[in-house]
Image (cartoon, helix red, strand yellow):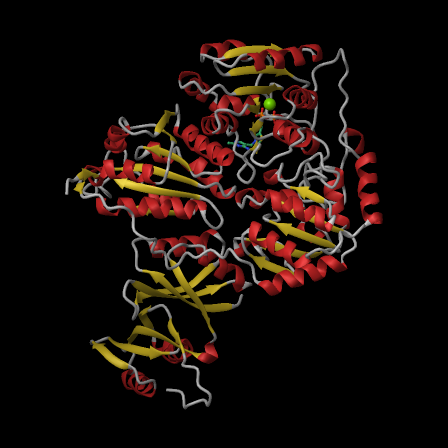
Amino acid sequence: MMQHTLSVLVEDKAGVLARVSSLLARRGFNIHSLAVGPTAEIGMSRMTIVVEAPELEQVKKQLHKLVNVVKITELDPNRSVEREIMLIRISTSGGGRSDVLEIGAIFKATVVDVGQNSITFQVTGTPSKLADFFELVRGYGVIDMAKSGRIALSRENKARKLKAV
Amino acid sequence: MPTISGAQALIKALEFEGVDVMFGVPGGAILPAYDPLYDSPINHILARHEQGAGHMASGYAWATGRVGVCMATSGPGATNLVTPLADALMDSVPMVAITGQVATTSVGNDAFQEAYTTGITMPCTKHNYFVTDAKDIANVVHEAFYIARSGRPGPVLVDVPKDVLNAEIEWEDPTDLDLPGYKPTITPHARRITEAIRLIEAAEQPVLYVGGGIIKAEASDVLRELVGALNIPVVTTLMGRGVVADSHPLTLGMPGMHGTYTATTAIQKSDLLIALGVRFDDRVTGDPDFFAPNAKVIHADVDPAEIGKVRDAEVPIVGDAKAVIEAMLAEWGDRPAPERTRWLEQVHRWQREKGLKYDQKPDGTIKPQFVIEELHRITGGNAIVVSGVGQHQMWASLHWGFEKPRTWINSGGLGTMGYAVPAAVGAKAGMPDELVWAIDGDGCFQMTSQELITAAVDGIPVKIALINNSQHGMVTQWQRLFYGGRLSASQLGVGAVDYVMLAEAMGCAGIRAETPGEVAPAIEKAMSINDRPVVVEFVVDRDEMVFPMVPAGGSNDIVLLGPEDL
Ligand SMILES: Cc1ncc(C[n+]2csc(CCOP(=O)(O)OP(=O)(O)O)c2C)c(N)n1
Ligand SMILES: [Mg+2]
C-alpha cells in the first residue's frame, strides 16, 4: 500500500496524540510512524505521520474533523526534507570492528558507545539512507536498534532549484 | 469581586447558553453541580437511567432545534451515556453532556467510580473536554455548545473533576471562541453552484436525494422552493422524513432497504442525483457498486469528509444545506421549471402500480400498518412521532404522512433499541404544546420503559403506541427470510407482559386493543387523556413482515414488494 507523509499542525493540548492515533485506528488507516514535538509556533505541536492508505483524501478529511487539528500538509518526498535518526548496536565479537567503523564513516555515522563486544552508532538521514546502512551492517550481527519516527518539512518554494542540502 | 464555586460557574455557564431543560441522574462526583441547580431556573428532569437522560436530550434537540443537555456522575453514570452519545454522533444531534469525575488528585488511581470518561467517549463524541481548572469552565461550556450546534452538529462531552467543581473562582463571562482548528465551511463555492446548475439543466431524469442535513440546516422551506423551481422528484431518507411534505406530488418517500419502490427505483434509473445533507448510508445504497449506476452526482454537505466517502461526486459542494440551496435558487433565477413530462409520468406510474400494500381483514388480527394509518387519521398527522428500532420503525416511516420537519424523531445511524420512550419524553419536555406519540416495539419498550415513570412524575404526558408482536420482529423477519425460519433468541413470549398493568404501575394510563375494531376507539381514548402518559398496546399480527425490501448487500434493482416476491 502507498505510504504518505503528512505534516499535521495541532494544538498543544492534553490528549491530542491519543485523538489522532485513535482516529486513524478507528478509520482503519495504518500508521507506519508518528513523530510529535513542539514547533515554532507557541501553543502548537507538529506531528509527522507516515500512513499507509489506499487513498489519502479520506485520511486528511477525517483528521480535519478533529477540533484540535489546525493544518494538514501532505509532503511530496521530492519537495520536502525527511529525516530519521537511528541508534544501532552492532556485534563486534566475531571481529569486523574496523569494517563496521569504515561503513560508519562512509555514512557519517557517529559512534556513541563502544564496548568489548559491540559498537553503537547514531545515524541520521533520509529513511533510505538508514535502510542502506542497516543492510550493510546486518551481516555483522545487529544486537539492537531503535529508530525515531520520520520528521519532515516542506522545502522553500524556489523559482530555480538551489542545490539541495 | 465575590467568588463562586466551579459548580456554580458550571450551572451559570449553562444558563448563559440559554438552557431551559436538562436531563440527568446525580451521584457522588457530580453532586456539587446539583446543589446550585436547586436554585437555578433550569428545569432538571431526573431520568431513571443515564441512557434515558441521553436520549431525552436527543429527542429534545430534534424537536426544538436547540442543543440537548444531559448530566451524569463519574464512572457508571458516564459509561451509561456512551450509547446515547454514539447515537447522537451517528445522527449528528447537537448535544452537550456534562459528567462528574473523581478529584484530579485521585485521577488515575482507580478511585471509587473512576472511569476514563474522555478516553471512552473520544470515538463517540464530536469533541470532548477534561476540565482541570475551574476558571476554564465558562469558556469550555461556551465552546462545547458552539461545537455541538455548528457545522455538522454532534455531541460534546465536558468532564469535570469534583475538586474543580468545589474550587472557588471569580466568574467571568466566556470570551470569544478560540478554535483555530475548527472553522466549518458554510458558504459554498460559487463555481460549484454554477457547475451544479449546468448538470441540472442537462439532466433528463434527476432526483433530489435529501436527508437529515436539511433539518439541521433549517433548510426545509428553501428546499421546497427548489423542488418547485426545478420540478424534480424528491426522496427523503429515514433521517429526513418531513423535510418536504409527503402529500406533495413530487415526494416519493423513503429510499433504500425498506424504502418505497418508487423512491428506490427512481434513484436507480436517475441520470442525476442531487444529494443534499445525506451520506449514502448502506441502508440507502445497498451494494454501492450497483447504486444509481447511470447517475452523475452533485453532493452537498457541511462535512467535507462525507463527500466522496462512499460515492464520488461529479460536483462536490462543501457548505451548509440552506446556503447551498439558496445559492442554487439564485443561480437558477427566474428560468421556468422544466416540464420533465416523461420522467414524471414514469415516476407516477410506479407510484400507482407499486405502492405500499397490506391486507387488513376486518375480523383478522390487527396489522401494524393499519395502526399507524389509523393513528395518522385520528391525529390528523398533527403530532411529533418518535420511534424505536425495528419493524415498527419502518412501518411508521413508510405509513405515516409527514408534512413538516422535526415531526419524525428516530435512531437511524446507530439503530438504538430503546430510543423511543426517552426521546419522546425529551421531545415533549422541549415542545410541551405539541402532541407527542411514540411508536414503539415491545422489545424496545422493555429496554427503556422505566422512563415513563419520569414522564408520569414530572408531568410530561407522552403517548406510546406499543406495537406488540411478542417478538424482536425485525430479527424474526431476517430469521424467517435468511436463516430457514430458525427463530433463535428472538421470541419475547406471547402474553409475557401485561402492558396495561405495567403502564398503570408506572403512573400512566394503560389501554389495550386486540381487534381491528378496537384500534380507533383505543386511540381516541388515549387522545382524551392528557393528565398523564398513556400506553396503548396494540396486539398485532406476529407474521407480518416489512415490505418493500431489498435484501441486505444486494442491488437496489431488486425490490421485493411483498411475501409473494420472495
Ligand atoms: C440495543 C440494540 N440491541 C439489539 C439490536 C438489534 N435489533 C434490531 S431490531 C431488533 C428487534 C426490535 O424488536 P421490537 O422493539 O419488538 O421491534 P419490532 O421489530 O418487533 O417491531 C433487534 C434485537 C438493536 N438494534 N439495538
Ligand atoms: Mg416486537
Q: Position of residue A133 (x, y in %)?
A: 37, 80
Q: Residue at x 32, y 64 (%)?
A: A45
Residue B473: image quadrant is: top right
The quadrant in which the C terminus of chain B is found is top right
The quadrant in which the N terminus of chain B is found is top left
Q: Is residue B341 left or right of residue A145?
A: right
Q: Among all residues in the image, which is located at the extreme left?
A: B1
Residue B224: image quadrant is: top right
Q: Where is residue B358 in the image (x, y as percent from the top left)?
A: 76, 25
Q: Is residue B515 above or below residue B326?
A: above
For the residue pair B209 and B258, the one nearer the viewer reads as B209
Question: How many marks on residues?
Answer: 0
Q: Residue at x 45, y 55 (%)?
A: A65
Whether residue A17 is visible: yes
Whether residue B122 is visible: no
Q: Which residue is drawn at 39% across and 23% down?
A: B48
Q: Is residue B426 left or right of residue A105?
A: right
Residue B493: image quadrant is: top right
Where does ligand 2 appear, by image quarter? Answer: top right
Q: Position of residue A23 (x, y in %)?
A: 43, 53
Q: Where is residue B350 in the image (x, y as percent from the top left)?
A: 81, 39
Q: Is residue B84 above or below residue A69?
A: above
